[in-house]
Amino acid sequence: MKQLSADCLNEIIEYLENDNVSLYSCLLVNRFWCKVSVRILWRNIQNYKTIISCLPDESKEILDKNKIIISTFNSKPPLFNYVSFIKNLSFYNINNIIKNILQHFQSVTPQSLNHKKYIVAMEIYKLFMYQTSLREFYLNLYNMDNTPIITFISYPGAINCLKYLSKLSCHSDIYPEFFYQLSQLCHNIQYMYITFREIISNGLTDLISVQKNLKYLKMYSYIREDLTNIIQPLSELPNTLIKYELYGDILYIPLSFISKYTNLRKLVLSFYDNSSSFKYFERLQYVNFTQLEILRFPIGYPSIEILIKFLESNGKNLKEFHICYSNSSLCLAVAKFCPNLRKFFSTGDKDLELLKKIFDGCQYLESMNIWCGNNYKGILEIVANYSPKNFYELMLYYVINTKSEILSEELEKFFINWKKRVPQKSLSFIIEGYDLEVTNEIMKIINKYKKIGIVKECEIIY
């Protein structure tokens, strides 16, 4: 019965994984609650001094021989083997532990300080490799000089530490031996985030190509433009990917490899340059992504004609569509080919009849961003009277300077009309624009309808 209680308590406390304040409170209930909750709390490092106190005697002796004193950090022995609970680790964590240990050595020569950093790093990596079984590893550090390069994958225990790794975040220029060794151990990474720099280590392509169950791939490249040499390992992956995101300024990467990932549920392509970066998108317009639910083009976008063809093939299952520009042709295509859309984010001045057609064609629409100008009064009226029954979030972007007195009158009229809707859903209302004048009268109206539950939240962004 006690074991059952522990299992039940663990299930409950799991929901508090990202709520450290509540987890700390659970530690104080009693010893039983403490033993259950401490394992969840310490999946991420909570205290660097505690980690230092967990160093084995052998490591402490090595540090002592190198005149690195840590006695001030471990006045009390740890209550638990906290290191064994850690599932998520980053270079940032390790660098901060090193800084804490060496905080009194800033006056020594750079050569001596670097040597001490290396010694401390070796012992810290030994500690983690031997005692942890990581699920997430974040290797992004913008100043790599702060953390010594250690071939820690060859340490005893590294196989058990890394073989269950499911999430990896890294830069492309980490030393090749690291990626080579990691590719020998980790074949079941599910989430991979790669920031590309001017150098792409050869071992990175090996690591990508051996993955058997990659589900989420996110790639950033704001310095390097040409990513064509990464195409081959991406093309060799099995068809397990369900989310793919690519961000950059101007990228030269053939997008045709995406056609292999027919199980995609989320596709995000974010480039500043349309003509160069999206020129390969035309090869995707007839590919059938049967499970695609989220499609985003936050900055640039393919040609509207090609995009309409893409929606004709893939709009049926879309639930979210985000594009930085839309014209009447694209909006009509959304109304025609995307009947299950929940969220539509676009810019471009909408005429009122077109807005009606979008609402009529997308009966499940819940949220919409509308770029409005002189027709904002009519937009508010149509949203109140014609938007689908589940609609609850409206984002208005004002492209002209709007008189606050007119806005306040129309805003109250809009809220009154919204109150008459059946079924009545509380509204989330966001207004964004330049030089908007927000008067006390406007805030009174917003607060008035918040109190009676018509408005759930209202945000004004300048």
Image (spheres, rainbow, N blue to C red):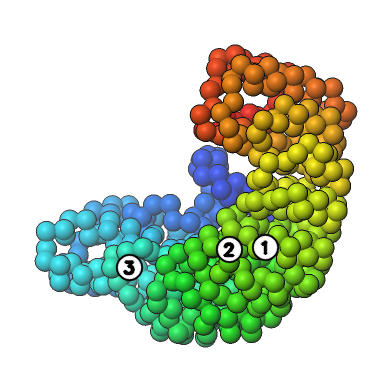
Q: What amino acid is found at the position of numbered circle 3 in the picture? A: Met
Q: Could you tell me which secondary element the residue under label 3 belongs to?
A: helix
Q: Which residue is mark 3?
A: 144
Q: Contact, CB < 8 Å: mark 1 with mark 2? A: yes
Mark 3, Cα crowd under 10 Å, few <14 / some 14-19 / many 20+, is few
Instruction: Give the camera-side residue of 380 and 141.
Output: 380
Mark 2: amino acid: Asn
Mark 1 highlights which residue? 303
Q: Nearer the viewer, residue 297 or 426?
A: 297
Q: How many marks?
A: 3
The answer to whether residue 64 is left or right of residue 432 is left
Measured in 3D between alpha carbons, the distance from the residue under mark 1 to the one under mark 2, in whole angstroms, is: 8 Å
Residue depicted at 47% across the width and 72% down the height: 225
Q: Is residue 205 left or right of residue 50?
A: right
Q: Where 441 falls versus 19 (above or below)?
A: above
Q: Is residue 295 above or below residue 461?
A: below
- The dot on residue 274 is 2
Q: Secondary structure at mark 2?
A: helix
Secondary structure under tag 1 reads loop
Front position in the image: 189 or 48 = 189
Give the quarter of the image for residue 4. Answer: bottom right
The residue sitting at 85% across, 26% down in the picture is 421
Q: Going from the N terminus, do you reach mark 1 or mark 2 first?
A: 2
